[in-house]
Structures are given as C-alpha cells and as structure tokens.
Image: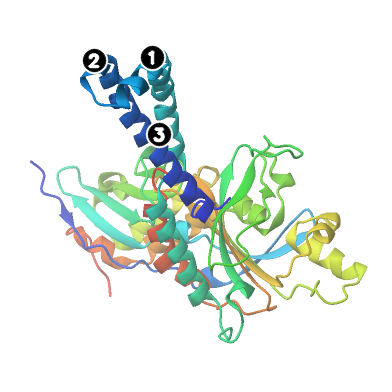
C-alpha cells in the first residue's frame, strides 16, 4: 500500500495583473473584462506518491466537476475539467524529469511550463495563466517531495 | 415571471390545494360507490342517488387532474430556494455599491438571468437562446424585466447579460450617458455601442441605468447557467471589490442553491 504525503490546502499565489481589467470589444461594443471568479483557484496543494514517484499538484475551484486526463508529454499529465476545461490537477512523473536525479523545484516548474505550452489550445486561456502562475509560484506544494534539493 | 414572485407562490398553493382536493375526492367518491344510500338520514340518500351516475366520471376526472396539479405544483415549487437566492442578490446589491445610502433601493439592483434555449412568448426567434430574468433584488421593478438574446451564434448576443454570458468573465461598463434627461441621438448611439442593445431597442424601453457589471454564474459541474447583472443609475458607483464580494460570498452560495434547478 502506498503512503502518499499531502500538503494542506493553501492559498495559491495569483498573478498581480489578475485584478487589472482588460479592454474587451466585439461588434463595436467596448467593455472592461475581469477574470471570471470561477477560473481562479481558491486553493492549491501538493500530493506525493513515493511508490510511483509522482507529484500531483491539485487545484480547488468554486466548482467541482469530473476531469479528463490529458497527457502533455512523458513527464506531465493534466487533469482538465470535462465541462469547463479548467486545470484541476497536474501530475508530474518525477522519474521522467531529468531522469529524476538531483531534482530541484525549478526543474519541476520548467517541466510543467513546457508541458503547459503544448496544451494552450486545450484549456481556457484565463484559467491557464492563473494555474500556470499558481503552480510555479507556490513552492510549498513541492515540499511534499523529500528528494528535492532546495538551493538557497 | 420571477421564480420567487407572489404569482408563482399563489400558483404553487393553488396547485397543492387542487392536488389534495382531487385525492380526497377520489377517496370519498369511491366510498359512495360502496354504500347503501338508504342507510343514511335525509338529505344524503337523495344526494347519493343523484351523484351515482356521475361518480365514475368524477373519479376519472380527479385521477387525471391530481397528477396534473402535482406537476404544476412542482414547476412552481422551490419557494425556499428562490427566497434564499433573493436574499443572496439583496446582499450582493448591498455590498457591491458604494455611496448609495440615500438612494431608493431600486436605483441599484442585482438581477439573476437564466439561460434557456427557448422562450414561451410571441416574439422573434423564441427558440434561439435567451437569458431570462428569474430573480431580482429588492421588491420593486420586478415585473417586465427585459430578456436578452443569447443564441448559439455568439455574435448575436444582446445586452450586458449577453456579453457576460458570451465572455464567461466579469464585464464592467460605466459612465454611460443619461437617457432619462434630454438624450441626444448621439447619447443613444454611445449607449447602444457600449451595451450591445440596438438604438431602436433603447428607445422602446428607455434604460435608466448608467453603469453595469455582469458576473457569470456556473453550476457545480462547471456548466454555464446564466449571469448576474448589477445595474446602477449612478455612472460609477460599483465597488472596486465587487468581484471579490461575488467570489467570496455570492458564487459559492449560488452554486449550491442552483444545484438541480
């Protein structure tokens, strides 16, 4: 039986420009657009499964829906909301990130960002940017992986 | 008609009464079929003999009407749900507008629109997709609320409600011209170009609001359900943290309240 370790749900780090309105328009109508509150994760956590050597970064939203697994590359698989296509979780196979040896949090962030770029057309852009920022700017979620090397 | 309206409550109560009356009627009429009228004192024997030929038809009628009344009751039910949604809209209105203490309540409103594929109304494109008002804050200006088109062809959406539904994001429009004074043709054009409603539509139903803020509303499973539109007669009275109020307080409660709606 695997004994995965989990961080508590914590407030995600959100991009500062998130609250800045964007100028929107269509058919000549001008308006200010803000990100939908449903696209902003309310919490983030990390889950590490030592048996599979896999890190799972999970997001919590106002909504909760069934997800579909979408494999981006050998190391990263996403769980996207079936209806909204929001990012609900990022699975990182640590063995496949630089061979899994001497890994630093930065390596995981790079693997996640590189995988996310391949998925730009499959997700909601507004949610994608926030989830990308939250997953790469919340170092606490990586603290569940004991083998990571933290450089000061 | 608003879901939480008094008319709907009356329909609910009436349908409930008819359903129970029909049920009780079936029981009583069935008993009268079995009894001997002569065992009872006047005027019952005479009444039972008069009723006897009609009894099977009355039982059949009750058996048909009772489920129909139950169906109507179900359609008009969920009064508690809509009472709570009304409270949520009232609170959202109270928290999202600033410096409006002296204004009448109906100058600053929050309206919940539900997206439906068709509308029971003699109008153009009744089947094209609509945003129908289902609840509004306060107790005034609750009737005759405008419906907006939100068809499958996204380019044809109407109004702030339609724009919000299409963008699935928070949409804010402010500093609109005052159409209540002596509006010029240019005022109508500016208002029309900023709100997505035709000039003819504006002239037909002169809007009083000068600023709007639309929020998307989703169900628990992430499917879009409709929108909430805040409107104010002031050009810029929306609180800068209206979005946070909606996220922290309104959206989680609405997600639960709208489940199975």
Q: Position of residue A97 (x, y in %)?
A: 32, 48
Question: Is residue A131 visible in this depiction of the protein?
Answer: no
Q: Of tags 1 and 3, which is closer to the observer? A: 1
Residue B143 in the image: x percent, y percent? 63, 57
Residue B70's label in the rendered image is 3
Q: How many marks?
A: 3
How far across and how far down the image is residue B103, in percent? Answer: 61, 82
Q: Which label is found at residue B36?
A: 2
Residue at the limit of the structure toward the left, as seen here: A1
Q: Earlier in the sequence, mark 2 or mark 3?
A: 2
State how far apart marks 2 and 1 are (Cα): 17 Å
Instruction: Using the image as rendered, state which of residue B235 and residue A118 is in the foreground.
Output: B235
Mark on residue B56? Answer: 1
Disc 3: CA contacts within 10 A as few (<14), some (14-19) or many (>=20): some
Which part of the image, by quadrant, shows the N terminus of chain A?
A: top left
Secondary structure, mark 3, is helix
Horizontal side of B112 relative to A54 (left or right) equals right
Using the rendered view, name the quadrant where residue B127 is placed: top right
Q: Earlier in the sequence, mark 2 or mark 1?
A: 2
How far apart are labels 2 and 3 at the CA level? 33 Å
Q: Secondary structure at mark 1?
A: helix
Establish if A99 lies above or below B169.
above
Task: Report x, y in % for residue A135.
Answer: 37, 60
- Residue farthest to the right? B185
Q: Observer-nearest residue: A3 or B29? A: B29
Mark linked to residue B45? none
């Amino acid at each position: 039986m695997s004994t995965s370790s989990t961080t508590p749900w914590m407030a995600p780090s959100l991009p500062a420009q998130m609250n800045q309105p964007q100028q929107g328009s269509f058919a000549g109508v001008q308006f200010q657009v803000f990100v939908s509150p449903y696209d902003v994760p309310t919490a983030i956590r990390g889950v590490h499964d030592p048996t599979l050597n896999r890190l799972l970064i999970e997001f919590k939203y106002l909504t909760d829906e069934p997800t579909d697994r979408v494999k981006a590359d050998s190391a990263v698989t996403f769980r996207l909301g079936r209806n909204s296509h929001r990012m609900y979780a990022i699975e990182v196979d640590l063995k496949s990130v630089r061979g899994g040896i001497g890994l630093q949090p930065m390596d995981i962030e790079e693997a996640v960002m590189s995988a996310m770029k391949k998925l730009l057309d499959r997700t909601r852009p507004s949610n994608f940017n926030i989830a990308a920022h939250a997953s790469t700017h919340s170092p606490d979620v990586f603290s569940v992986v004991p083998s990571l090397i933290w450089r000061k | 008609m608003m879901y939480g309206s008094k008319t709907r409550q009356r329909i609910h109560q009436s349908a409930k009464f008819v359903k129970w009356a029909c049920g009780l009627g079936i029981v009583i009429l069935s008993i009268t079929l079995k009894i001997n009228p002569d065992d009872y004192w006047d005027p019952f024997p005479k009444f039972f003999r008069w009723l006897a030929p009609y009894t099977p038809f009355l039982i059949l009628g009750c058996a048909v009407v009772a489920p129909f009344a139950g169906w109507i009751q179900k359609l008009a039910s969920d009064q508690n749900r809509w009472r709570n949604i009304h409270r949520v809209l009232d609170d959202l209105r109270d928290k999202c507008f600033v410096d409006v203490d002296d204004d009448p309540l109906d100058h600053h409103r929050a309206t919940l629109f539900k997206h439906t594929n068709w509308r029971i109304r003699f109008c153009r494109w009744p089947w094209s997709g609509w945003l129908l008002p289902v609840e509004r804050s306060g107790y005034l200006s609750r009737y005759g609320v405008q419906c907006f088109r939100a068809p499958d062809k996204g380019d044809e959406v109407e109004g702030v409600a339609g724009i919000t539904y299409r963008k699935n994001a928070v949409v804010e429009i402010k500093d609109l011209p005052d159409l209540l004074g002596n509006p010029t043709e240019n005022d109508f054009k500016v208002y029309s170009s900023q709100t997505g409603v035709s000039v003819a539509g504006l002239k037909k139903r002169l809007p009083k609001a000068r600023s709007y803020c639309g929020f998307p509303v989703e169900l628990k499973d992430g499917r879009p359900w409709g929108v909430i539109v805040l409107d104010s007669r002031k050009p810029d009275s929306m609180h800068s943290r209206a979005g946070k109020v909606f996220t922290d307080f309104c959206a989680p409660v609405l997600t639960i309240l709208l489940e199975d709606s």
